[in-house]
Image: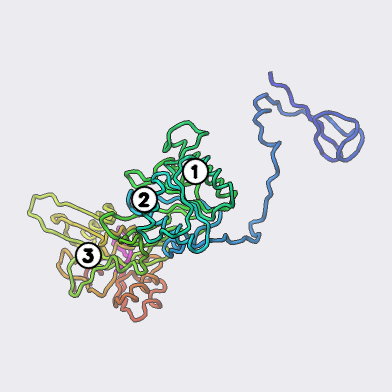
């Protein structure tokens, strides 16, 4: 049976007391406490009421002065670019990628360079023995770096060791799926173990000010294995992408609480490890002395970095009755179907009896909607066998109505194209800042896709 909750309210100052007394304890007035009917409180509510008994939380104003987080540079400019300037003190970073893509190599190079610069660095390997890590460091020419190395999987042992002295400025855990907490039942790699181990390591980073980097495995779909909450717990999520058969690697920031997202760092895998690529556009462009049909250069944008890539299309006419094939590498197949439909419906071109093969050179993956116009140019060039000028770039978004819509950051795209020697640009009408950054480049603007096709075909 629930009992009514008694409360006595002072009629002079409004203070509330749980029992009656002749004098109010707050305002010292006499005979002012009057009983009021309170809400019926059940034993469950009494135990689970969270509106009292806690500590006061300090609330501040939104316009209060904020101190920028202190960063520690890794010595690798492309890694610092993806991180937004370097590792933040007390931050947790999660990096994932396919097996053999170079995650451990990249972090070992960063740890060695930071250690050579005077920072205290701890590298904890749960997958390899300490001698294996030493041999890799010697192959990379970093065997003399003063990195503190250990092979362990117990989170309790790791945190006890790191807390026994001054905390390291950088702690690398390779990988989080191999860590084990004795407070949780289950084998390493299970959802509960990964969550509990990551929580303890992140708590150490916040309390001691160390920058912790967690290496994460990925599933067959390319997403980081383990609970999705792991990506919410950390401050930064980096994805290391690339094909093992290709030389290049791209480090992409999918989440960053201390900087911008969609920033990329470009690396090349060589015999001496991962090397930085100062000019990523050189990796994805083909040197052509004469025009080739079905090839168009597109200035893509990754965060604030423009990257010029070559889009290649091959259109093969089939005999009547054969089922045409559509094959796409490096672009969205659904978007290719949309561009083909607009070319047929709005421009009078027929691809229904043709096989279409689309490829982005160098294994690069394009997600920018501004690639629509460059793809359309490559398709029209492949169908008509008329090459697009080798000194021209194209970008713009195509609508279902056949309109070519402006895209963001056109000035950055034109500036990068101009630096690499391109002299012409085909773009939508009314792009802000295009004429200022275009400089000596000849800009040809188009409002509809039909006019763009007429221009390519010389109509």
Distance from disc 2 to disc 3, alpha carbons, whole Å, reads 32 Å
Q: Marks 1/2: CA distance?
A: 18 Å
Find disc 1 in the rendering and name its residue: 198
In percent of the image, x 52 and y 60: which residue is there?
119
Is label 1 or label 3 in front? Answer: 1
Q: Nearer the viewer, residue 291 or 272?
A: 272
Foreground residue among 62 and 175: 175
Among the two numbered marks 1 and 2 on one chain, the one whose residue lies closer to the N terminus: 2
- Is residue 117 left or right of 54 when viewed as pictured? left
Label 2 element class: strand
**Which residue is label 2 attached to?**
97
Task: Give the residue at the far bottom of this rendering.
Answer: 440
Whole-percent x, y for residue 337 in the image: 24, 54
Query: Which image quadrant is residue 426 in?
Result: bottom left
Q: Residue at x 85, y 29 (%)?
A: 20
Indicate left or right for 221 with 355 as reference: right
Secondary element at tag 3: helix
Magenta stretch? 394-404
Q: Hey, which residue is sitting farthest left in the picture?
A: 319
Instruction: Using the image, determine if residue 18 lies above or below residue 328.
Output: above
Q: Is residue 235 visible from the viewing direction of this image? A: no
Q: Secondary structure at mark 1?
A: helix
- For disc 3, the marked residue is 378
Q: Is residue 282 visible to us here?
A: yes
Q: Position of residue 181 (x, y in %)?
A: 50, 37
Q: Give me the C-alpha separation between circle 1 and circle 3.
A: 47 Å
Label 1 CA crowd tier, 10 Å (few <14, some 14–19, many 20+) = many
Report the residue that reaches farthest toward the right. 30
* Magenta span contains residue 401: yes
Q: Quadrant of residue 329?
A: bottom left
Residue nearest the viewer, comparing 449 with 225: 225
Q: Tell whether position 396 is magenta.
A: yes
């Amino acid at each position: 049976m629930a009992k009514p909750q008694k409360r006595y309210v002072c009629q002079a100052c409004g203070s509330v007391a749980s029992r009656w007394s002749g004098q109010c304890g707050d305002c010292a007035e006499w005979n002012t406490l009057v009983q009021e009917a309170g809400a019926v409180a059940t034993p469950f509510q009494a135990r689970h009421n969270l509106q009292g008994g806690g500590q006061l939380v300090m609330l501040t104003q939104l316009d209060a002065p904020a101190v920028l987080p202190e960063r520690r540079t890794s010595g690798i400019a492309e890694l610092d670019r993806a991180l937004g300037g370097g590792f933040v003190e007390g931050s947790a970073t999660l990096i994932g990628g396919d097996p053999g893509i170079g995650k451990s190599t990249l972090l070992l190079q960063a740890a060695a360079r930071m250690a050579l610069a005077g920072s205290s660095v701890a590298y904890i390997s749960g997958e390899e023995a300490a001698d294996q890590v030493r041999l890799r460091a010697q192959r990379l020419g970093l065997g003399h770096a003063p990195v503190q190395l250990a092979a362990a999987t117990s989170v309790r042992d790791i945190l006890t060791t790191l807390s026994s002295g001054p905390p390291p400025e950088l702690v690398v855990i390779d990988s989080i799926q191999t860590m084990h907490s004795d407070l949780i039942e289950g084998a390493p790699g299970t959802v509960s173990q990964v969550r509990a181990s990551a929580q303890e390591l992140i708590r150490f980073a916040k309390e001691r000010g160390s920058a912790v980097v967690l290496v994460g495995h990925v599933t067959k779909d390319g997403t980081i294995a383990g609970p999705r909450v792991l990506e919410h717990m950390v401050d930064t999520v980096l994805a290391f992408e690339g094909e093992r058969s290709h030389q290049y690697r791209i480090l992409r920031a999918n989440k960053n609480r201390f900087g911008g997202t969609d920033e990329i760092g470009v690396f090349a895998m060589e015999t001496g490890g991962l090397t930085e690529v100062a000019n990523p556009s050189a990796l994805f462009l083909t040197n052509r002395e004469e025009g080739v049909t079905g090839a168009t250069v597109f200035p893509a944008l990754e965060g604030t970095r423009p990257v010029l890539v070559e889009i290649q299309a091959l259109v093969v006419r089939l005999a009547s009755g054969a089922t045409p094939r559509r094959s796409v590498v490096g672009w969205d197949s659904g978007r290719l179907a949309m561009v083909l439909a607009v070319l047929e419906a709005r421009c009078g071109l027929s691809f229904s009896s043709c096989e279409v093969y689309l490829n982005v050179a160098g294994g690069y993956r394009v997600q920018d909607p501004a690639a629509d116009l460059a793809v359309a140019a490559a398709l029209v060039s492949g169908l008509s066998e008329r090459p697009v000028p080798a000194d021209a770039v194209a970008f713009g978004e195509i609508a279902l109505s056949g309109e070519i819509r402006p895209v963001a950051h056109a000035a950055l795209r034109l500036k990068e194209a101009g630096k690499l020697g391109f002299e012409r640009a085909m773009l939508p009408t009314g792009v802000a800042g295009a004429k200022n950054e275009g400089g000596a480049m000849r800009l040809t603007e188009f409002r509809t896709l039909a006019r763009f096709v007429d221009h390519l075909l010389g109509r």
